[in-house]
Image: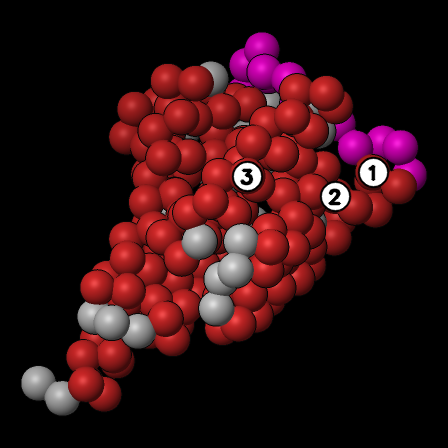
Amino acid sequence: MSDTLTAILVIAGSYLLGSIPFGFVLPRVFRKEDIRTVGSGNVGATNVFRVYGRWLGVPVAILDVLKGFTPALVGLALGSDWLAIAAGSAAMIGHARPIWLKFSKGGKMVATAGGVSLALAPLAALLCVALWLVVFMLTKYASLASLAAAVALPIATFAFGASWPIVAFSSGAAIAVAILHRHNMGRLLAGNEPRFTRAPKPVTGRPVR
């Protein structure tokens, strides 16, 4: 098999893996509900955790991290930072626009981008995880914690001496996360972003973006 064909298969497989909407699948299987109709309507781990608690939220978060970590690790195993970046990016795109949900809005890439970064630059990624936890614990804003970690990622990868393609990927990932959180940023600036709390029960109706 040629290197080009191998790369194409890895990238395509990474997109399909990234497209698996675990935040949709687990609540559907265990609660018989569509996560898109409750809480914020987002299929990411934060909304699952908010609505259903840690017993579903933590597994979704871990699976979302793994579907970014695994493709990037495969790319590195094949000996190429570029293939690892392409595969990880494909998984992130799949997470944001999953084919299994007919390309409708998926998650906001934070956990999946974290998984890719953990494979490419583990020390930088762990530092950003620690930052996320500190900001979240101090403010209870998951969106602010995600934005802080995203901004810190390219700085941390550069500081830890990652290759320039990985630093460039980290910068692109930070921009993508910021774009997907643009509505959250508007609410943070306006002072009406909801803090993270467990919903006492699924809240139906029009979701908040």
Mark 3 neighbour class, 10 Å CA radius: few under 14, some 14 to 19, many 20 or more: some
Q: Secondary structure at mark 2?
A: helix
Left or right, 182 with reference to 93: right
**Magenta-colored segment: predominant secondary structure:** loop
Q: Quadrant of the C terminus?
A: top right
Left or right, 177 with reference to 126: right
> As shown in the figure, which amino acid type bears the numbered disc 2?
Asn
Q: Nearer the viewer, residue 56 or 14?
A: 14
Q: Secondary structure at mark 1?
A: helix
Which residue bears the numbered disc 2? 184
Q: Residue at x 85, y 31 (%)?
A: 192
Mark before the other along the chain sequence, 3 or 1: 3
Mark 3 or 1, closer to the camera = 3
Q: Residue at x 57, y 41 (%)?
A: 128
Q: Position of residue 146 (x, y in %)?
A: 63, 41
Q: Which residues are magenta?
A: 190-202
Q: Quadrant of the N terminus?
A: bottom left
Mark before the other along the chain sequence, 3 or 2: 3
| Tag shown at residue 127 | 3
Q: Residue at x 49, y 24 (%)?
A: 49
**Residue 51 drawn above or below residue 142:** above
